Image (tube, rainbow, N blue to C red):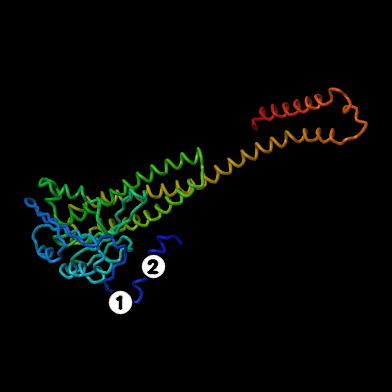
Amino acid sequence: MGRMARKLIHKSSRKAGQSPGTLLHIGAKQIETPRISIFDYGARQLNERKTASVEECLAFRESPTVTWLNVIGLHNPEIVSKIGLCFGMHPLVQEDILNTNQRPKIEDYEDYLYTVVKMLSYDEKTNELDIEQVSLILGKNFVITFQEKEGDVFNPLRERLKNPEGKTRKAGADYLYYALLDTIVDSYFIILEKIGEKIEALEEALVKHPRNETLQEIHALKREMIYLRKSVWPLREVVSTLERGESKLISKPTMVYLRDAYDHTIQVIDTVETFRDMLSGMVDLYLSSLSNRMNEVMKVLTVIATIFIPLTFIAGVYGMNFKYMPELSHPLGYFAVWGVMLVVAGTMFLYFRKKKWL
């Protein structure tokens, strides 16, 4: 069992014996002080602010404009509890928000939609895939997102919200909800592009100089593809559910955009499956390369040994030390034996070259 798998089981075991709806954070503690960013906007106005006070967010509950509350930091269950109480979130939803080991899913509570997705990024220091859970709550005129830590892929969307002529400012909360999902899905293509570059480099290394380190990199990439697949495949079901239009919170104009997001999700899944097949084939290619290299070494050693077999025979015959061997007393006997050995070795070498065994 891998280290990450053991860590997930250890964290999830903390919930054992707790009653349903118990607010307990399960995940890494990333930041000391949770922060909340607020975007309250309409076609003509935009109110943007950052705060650490939950009470300041409560005033936007009945705001006629569209409100986006982005909560960063989940290790303090009290913040989630206060926001959940104000916006009418079910205790089980609050529990799932704090449990960062959820699989992507969507739940319809009539007055709001609860969605879990995985936001992916690459850690520049370790050059490894970083997976973060993002919970989205869609209400009539608000969207609430819960993140584990600082940093996300939503900056392009924030810039679009600052443009008063943009479609996002003129649309409702459902379009903002779609835009958040679409931004996360589009970020998968960036991850896949980096993984594709790694696979190309590994393929080149396998052909030229396969090493044990190369095999370790292949296995590391296979693990990343497993986590990526677990993040993407359930998202297909999430977007498909939204696309069917079963929720009254999603307007018909937004359905067209959700179909586009669904197409992007399918493209990501197809690419993930292709990369998984390529990595599986690369393991076979690595083993074949090692086998071919071993065969080449064994072929050279076999040829060398074959050349020396007749030479060893000649040396053995003239090393028997019989008294009456006529060649032993000949003045040129030593040089004659060497000549015969060289002719035999040269003839066999040329024969092997002609057969392309060397």
The x and y percentages for residue 67 are 13, 58
Q: Which residue is mark 1?
A: 19
Query: In this view of the protein, which residue sits in the foreground, 72 or 238?
Result: 72
Query: In this view of the protein, which residue sits in the foreground, 236 or 86?
Result: 86
Dots 1 and 2: beta carbons under 8 Å? no
The x and y percentages for residue 304 are 69, 35
Q: Which residue ends up furthest to the left in the rendered image?
A: 44
Amino acid, disc 2: His
Residue at the location (81% across, 24% down)?
336
Image quarter in which the C terminus is found = top right
Element under disc 1:
loop
Q: Which residue is mark 2?
A: 10
Element under disc 2:
helix
**Residue 212 appears left or right of 88:** right
**Residue 157 appears left or right of 333:** left
Rendered image quadrant of residue 165: top left
Residue at the location (12% across, 50% down)?
169
Q: CA distance from mark 1 to mark 2?
A: 18 Å
**Residue 324 appears left or right of 243:** right
Rendered image quadrant of residue 346: top right
Amino acid, disc 1: Ser
Q: Is residue 103 above or below residue 356?
A: below
Residue at the location (9% across, 64% down)?
59
Residue at the location (13% across, 52% down)?
171
- Dot 2: few (<14), some (14–19), or many (≥20) neighbours within 10 Å? few
The x and y percentages for residue 98 are 27, 66
Query: Closer to the camera: disc 1 or disc 2?
Result: 2
- Dot 1: few (<14), some (14–19), or many (≥20) neighbours within 10 Å? few
